[in-house]
Amino acid sequence: MRRDASAFRASVLAGLLTALAVCAGDAVARTFPFGPRTRAVNDLGNQFVPFHAHLWDLLHGRADGGLLLNWQSGYGTAFLPDLGTYLSSPFAPLVGLFPRDEIDLAVYVITVLKTAVAAGAMAVLLRARRAPGPACGPWWGAAMLGASYGLCGWAVVEASYNPMWLDGLIGFPLLCLVGEWVRTGRRPLLGPAVVAMVWVANFYTAYMATLGAALVLLARGAGGWRVLGRAAGTVLLGIGLAAPVLVPVFLGSRHAYPGWTREFRAAGWAEVAARTLPATYGFFTPALFVGTGALLLAAALPFHRKVPVRERWAFSGLVAGVLLSSQWEPTHLVWHVFATPNGSPYRQTFVFAGVVVIAAWTAVSYGWPGRRALLGGTAVLGVVAVGAAFGGLATVWSYALFAGGLAASVGAVAVVRRQPRRAVVGAGLLAGALAVQAAATTAYADRERPARLDDYPAWGAEHAARAAAVAGGDGWPRYRTDPGRPQLTGNDPLLVGGQGSAYYSSHTPAVLTRTLAALGGGWTSNGRSVQSLDNPVTDALFGVGARWRDAAVPRTTDVLPLVTVRARTGELRYGESPFRNQELLLGSRVYDLPADGACPVGSDVFVWAPDFTGTARLGTAGGGPSVELRGGLPKRRAAMAPLGTQRTAGARVVLEGRGTVPPSGSVGCLDRARLADAVARLRATAAVAVDVTPDGVRAQLPPGARAGTAVLAAPRIAGWRCGGRPADSYLGLVAVRVRAGQTSVSCAFRPPGLRAGAAGGSLAAAVWAGWALVRLRERVRLRRRGRVASAARHQDFTGAAPSRGPRGGGAA
């Protein structure tokens, strides 16, 4: 009980110190929620906050769609892969406790809470790994080192704006704890459950954490093949329990648009050394900071004679091996599931922080390092500091904080070693040095990130106004409402509402990206972030009856219902021109493509220049409103843009900027009357009623419907089935053949891998339950045997068998 109580105290102290340092750093930098500086950089503002907003809507019954199908993004996309990638953390549902317009605060609180829990989990692990003997390491030492782990540079610099990674930060010490249970034969049923929880929370960092925990187990001395077999079985059973989430995520990524591809380039060793110092930043270098106190103790381990030789060199070698493996391409690829990440290429750095802290605790648990060990550790850190000077990342503040922390750490160890009764002084020095260094590192990163990465404002008046306007114009499922352009984020439909084409995810379907690109759509992030397409033809085709423009959401009647019926034709394919592709999908000619670039008076003018960056306007130089084009293939693709109505004969499109323009067909002239006629013809045979569910669509066809192809205005992503068979594709949209006189069409969506994952999870659960039953029976048998043995001992002592006696229980 005393051991459990000390672990609890260490966990709480580590968590509190971590949360305090993170919040202090953000407050110093005047970063949200402590000031006006936004923290929503890169994917935090573009992906994670909008996805958590969608989760809020799901929890409160306000989302369009359910766990399987998201009707708000990309005209209808699978949601389970996104759920398993971004929102499966046990902390994610906490957003439901906050007001919807405080979604940024909710994500921030969850981020700080995860960081604190990671620190607490590490403290518990360290207390569970105490060395034998009277020293065993003080509980507050475990708390300080747990906080060092929670406040590592990777956590406060990189994962702070990738909050789902923080589940891996929590997972590493938990998986190492499972390794301890395997070594000692304890908690065999709880181990797989912990593994499953870690893998469900975030499979990507869970993979790295599992590799790291395996290395720690080997460094501990696994105890032979039997222990290794138990460990492998525990991990495989845990992953099997997580299969209902993991399999759909894996298959969802297989159907995603390819996105980025990069080649690994190792960072310079001077920059690597600099990142061990506080208050440094580099997007393509590993954030190795773990606090000078933890570094000093880990560096002192090889010189600490009280530590057994095998442990001394096993954990020192583990620290060096993990660091070197991050710089060698073959092992780098192993850490990152055999694919170099698009950004932040050192995502496994939290494992390095964890093994450094474990090495530091290994030194402390056998007694505080003496003078020889401290001198050796200080010399190692001195070499690192000198090496950092040859790079360009370390600043004067970095060295000042490093030197102050080193002095405080050496002083703390000396005080505790010589005067154990003054442990509170040593603890205060270590805690103060760590908190100051971590807060400074947090503040420095808060200032550097917005200057180097895209940033997005927290929810404010502009978000509220657009959300209110979109909600006021919502007519789903009779028609879609697009939150419009310019976009606030890549996932505006999730953030402010509506059912548009914009969608940004690691699982953006390839069919969605290619279909919208063929129709003139734009993208960023190499095709993973599909943008809203503001065009009357595509709005009509996809049923967008309302669109946000200039603080208003005007509605139109020239749109089709979600299900239309087309005449059967041969195989159709898109061509090079998005204008002709729109007409192909519409089934009518509505554009003129002038060879000289001058549209007829009265037509609507559109420009298509996907690889051009600059402005476009209608008229002579210096006249007419301009629109921005942001091209630059393959990273960015400029969307087809409206330039207004042609008022003057002979006026041409003027482009100013850089990039290439298609030699012909870059200007399209839309005839609104022809578009209205085409829509009317399709509406005459379209569905008269459409019922949309969280996992499908049912449409009622008009009486006397002709034979043809029913087309659902949603991308034909993998998983759609109509009439009990896989759906067909009509130019990238969901389709099914209908007979003459057929009265209804029904299509359902099931994410690929859902059944396989459920089957795998059920099998693993059955094995786990069977194992639990065997353990229970074994325990009952042992208890019975114990009672029999006890009765026998009683008989030997009294000379007679114990009598049950009368009802009172006394002897006869």
Image (cartoon, rainbow, N blue to C red):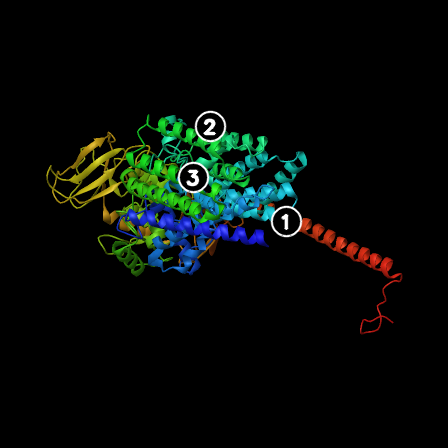
Q: Is residue 631 visible to us here?
A: yes
Residue 785 left/right relative to 543: right
Report the disc number at residue 18. none
Instruction: Identify which residue, 392 or 667, lies in the foreground.
Output: 392
**Front label number (2 vs 1):** 2
- Residue drawn 30% across and 57% down? 467
Instruction: Identify which residue, 799 or 33, lies in the foreground.
Output: 799
Q: Is residue 690 visible to us here?
A: no
Of labels 1 and 3, earlier in sequence is 1
Report the disc number at residue 293. 3
Type of amino acid at the residue the image marks with label 1: Leu
Report the disc number at residue 189. 1
- Residue drawn 63% across and 40% down? 183
Type of amino acid at the residue the image marks with label 2: Leu
Graded by Cα atoms within 10 Å as few (under 14), some (14 to 19) or many (20 or more), the crowding at tag 1 reads some
Q: Are marks 1 and 3 in contact (CB under 8 Å)?
A: no
Of labels 2 and 3, earlier in sequence is 3
Query: What is the CA distance from the residue labelled 1 to the residue labelled 3?
Result: 37 Å
SS assignment at label 2: helix
What residue did someone put label 2 on? 324
Instruction: Identify which residue, 669 or 706, lies in the foreground.
Output: 669
Asked if residue 212 is positioned above or below residue 800 in the image, the reply reads above
**Front label number (2 vs 3):** 3
Residue 541's x, y, as percent? 34, 48
Quadrant holding the C terminus: bottom right
**Front label number (1 vs 3):** 3
Instruction: Identify which residue, 439 or 182, lies in the foreground.
Output: 439
Type of amino acid at the residue the image marks with label 3: Gly
Of labels 2 and 1, earlier in sequence is 1
